[in-house]
Image: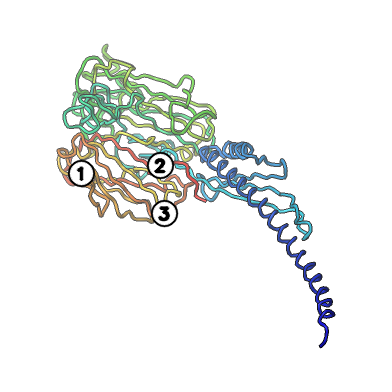
Amino acid sequence: MASLRPRRDEEDGYVAVFVALLMVVLVGMAAFTVDVGQWYVTGQQAQRAADAAALGGVPELPDDQPDAFAAAQQLAAANGFQDGVETATVTPAIDGQPTRLRVTVSRTVDNIFGPLLGLDQTTITRTAVADYAGPVAMGSPCNQFGNDPEATSASRSAACEDTGEFWANVGSLRATKQSGDAFQNGVCSGGDDGCTGSTNDDYDPNGYFYTVTLSRAVSNLQLEAFDPALINVGDLCTQNLTGAAAIPAASTDPGTEPSQRYKAGPDSPYCTGDVRFGGTGQVATEFTVREMTDASDPWDPLSYPVVSGCQQTFPGFNGALAEKLNRSVATYDAYVASVFRRWRPLCTIPAADAGTYLIQVKTNGVGADAASGHNRFGLRGWSSGDSSAKDAIAIAGYNKMAVYANLPSATTLFHLARLPSGSGGQVLNVRLFDVGDSSNTGTIQVVAPDGFDFSGCKGYGPQGGVSGTDLPTCSVTANSSSFQGKWQTIAVPIPDDYGCDDEDPTACWAKLQYSYGSGNQPTDTTSWQASIEGDPVRLVE
């Protein structure tokens, strides 16, 4: 029988070779495992830094890209990734649209076992994209808010041509809420929405804010208000104007044609409809211009400091106007003549930087708060030395506004709310207070920006109740009885594929089509509020 030992000796050599080869694989796997663990940890750290940088920097957009980039760099450094230090890079950039910030964070790490395989270093890169939905702009895409009976190509942007016919409205502390101004009328009657007893819970002592957005620097920026004082003529301009239109032009202030400027009735383009409801004294209106600084918070308008010398108070007047507007009689009142149906300067800024300014308008605490009424006015911004500046200025309501419409038999499209291109898939909530004050029933419809359609809308309030009802055409039928003192909400889903040109001031606007109908005479003071549901700052990538 042959011995087996020699064969076993031969196999011992094979095992040694196999073990040696296996050790190479095992060492390689160990090296790969250790280095991959290091890559994974570094990747997690880089992603956290990128997320924090994008979320922290994006609120500065679209107004201030340099500050957005600087904030992103600082936050990345605070999370362990300082640009240019320890082989780290932090790169902020605008991501396709002006409200999105992309931050890319990288770090090159030295591999521990990788050199055994010829891989000395590995660069780990992570990216985050954040979107910012700032306060919703409302009411106007151009350099004017409200009507302008004296519009010229020198003062009015072409983007204003399709704006609705309305005046801005500011109420007063002693006026009733169901008169239409939900945010500046302080007194509640029975059954009004948003009230505790006779107290208006929606009342805002700070009044209304209007954003003045400059897409570029403007020299000699002029901010003005039309008819800034409450000069009582009644809703339809039929009060206190007897004889005013017959004043000889030679007896009025320069540039006045009394038969036009002082004409009575709602068919006059100068008819703002300022109205007194009663009380004692006069309603005074304060206009304050505020400017953005590094400390300003877009969601806190009071964080914008007042521009020096740019706060004015305009007392009201109630009485016969012909004797106040006629320069040839002893009762002539230079103040009344200078503010009634005229543009008045609010502020001149010699060198206005690109960005956002605010115009604050309020009535409480600046006059006789025992008086009550509605002051209707317009706003505009332009430059006497820069003819193209009007096209770089946009004035809009800040999240909420009150308007007055008194144009007979009108079907008009109001610019309701600007929806940035990043708002697809979210919900636009539109709140309308006390709509439909007119001689006949009107129809109100929310219309999508060009190229899109709204569907799946729901209504809550007089039309829809608490549980809501489907609104197939995103419209409600409003009247002065069932909507009196009531909030109507329309929830509007924004299409998932929604997009628009954020750089175009006339694009991205959802509109409100208001059809008062033939033969209808509106006297409609109403308050609107718009918001996009969801976190204003969010990661989208």
Looking at the image, the residue that sits furthest to the bottom is: 1
Q: Is residue 233 above or below residue 512?
A: above
Q: In terms of sequence position, does the residue under pointer 3 or pointer 1 come before the other?
A: 1
Q: In terms of sequence position, does the residue under pointer 1 or pointer 2 come before the other?
A: 2
Q: Position of residue 247 (x, y in %)?
A: 25, 23
Left or right: residue 242 versus residue 230 is: left
**Label 2: which residue?**
141
Say which of 472 and 201 sits in front. Answer: 201
Q: Amino acid at mark 2?
A: Pro
Residue 498 shows which numbered tag? 3
Left or right: residue 514 versus residue 12 is: left
Q: Amino acid at mark 1?
A: Gly
The residue depicted at 38 percent of the width and 24 percent of the height is: 287
The residue tagged with tag 1: helix, strand or loop? Answer: strand
Residue 465 shows which numbered tag? 1
Looking at the picture, the colour scheme in use is rainbow
The residue depicted at 62 percent of the width and 36 percent of the height is: 78
Q: Is residue 66 above or below residue 360?
A: below
Q: Is residue 347 above or below residue 211?
A: above
Between disc 1 and disc 2, the foreground one is 1
Q: Position of residue 184 (x, y in %)?
A: 29, 27
Looking at the image, the residue that sits furthest to the front is: 1
